[in-house]
Amino acid sequence: MEIIIHDHWVRKVSGSSLKGYVTTTLDRLKEVFGNPLEGGDKVTAEWIIEDEDGNLATIYDWKLSDTPTGVYQWHIGGHNSHALDIIRTILPEARVSTDYIYDNTI
């Protein structure tokens, strides 16, 4: 799968919404996607990923004062379920789910 990692906010993100979660670390995301975009109002770190068919996936934290560095359930956004497929393909070792798991040990 060919992917594009956007290094700036793109208009295509507009209208995307939460589709699921990926459990991994900040270091792993940086290893795969590079440094995150700086956050804004409710996000401290975000990556915007696009596949060769133009499907979009975003990975971001939500409503935290600091970017999580340990294992965290990062949010996956997109326009449809292809967002989850993109992340599953790129991070096969990570847990990708549509369910939020409240567990402070992960």
Image (cartoon, rainbow, N blue to C red):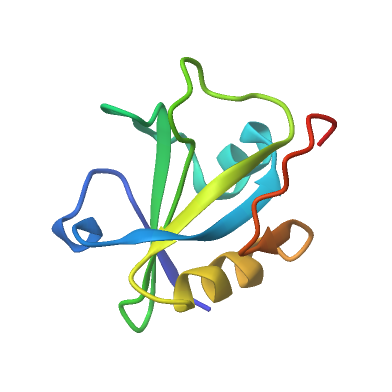
Q: Nearer the viewer, residue 100 or 76?
A: 100
Instruction: Determine whether 101 is above or below 96 in the image.
Output: above
Q: Residue at x 64, y 53 (%)?
A: 22
Q: Residue at x 66, y 33 (%)?
A: 27
Q: Residue 45 lies in what quarter of the image? A: top left
Relative to 39, is 66 on the left or the right? right
Q: Nearer the viewer, residue 29 or 76?
A: 76
Instruction: Determine whether 82 is above or below 28 in the image.
Output: below
Relative to 22, is 11 on the left or the right? left
Q: Residue 70 lies in what quarter of the image? A: top right
Estimate the x, y position of residue 49 in percent, counting from the top left.
40, 59
Estimate the x, y position of residue 39 in percent, counting from the top left.
33, 29
Image quarter of the C terminus: top right
- The outermost residue toward the bottom is 53
- The outermost residue toward the top is 65
Instruction: Determine whether 27 is above or below 95 in the image.
Output: above
- The outermost residue toward the right is 105
Q: Residue at x 70, y 44 (%)?
A: 24
Estimate the x, y position of residue 77 in percent, counting from the top left.
42, 58
Relative to 96, is 86 on the left or the right? left
- The outermost residue toward the left is 11
Question: Total of numbered circles in the picture?
Answer: 0
Q: Residue 18 lies in what quarter of the image? A: bottom left
Q: Nearer the viewer, residue 50 or 79?
A: 79
Q: Residue at x 50, y 16 (%)?
A: 66
Relative to 43, is 92 on the left or the right? right
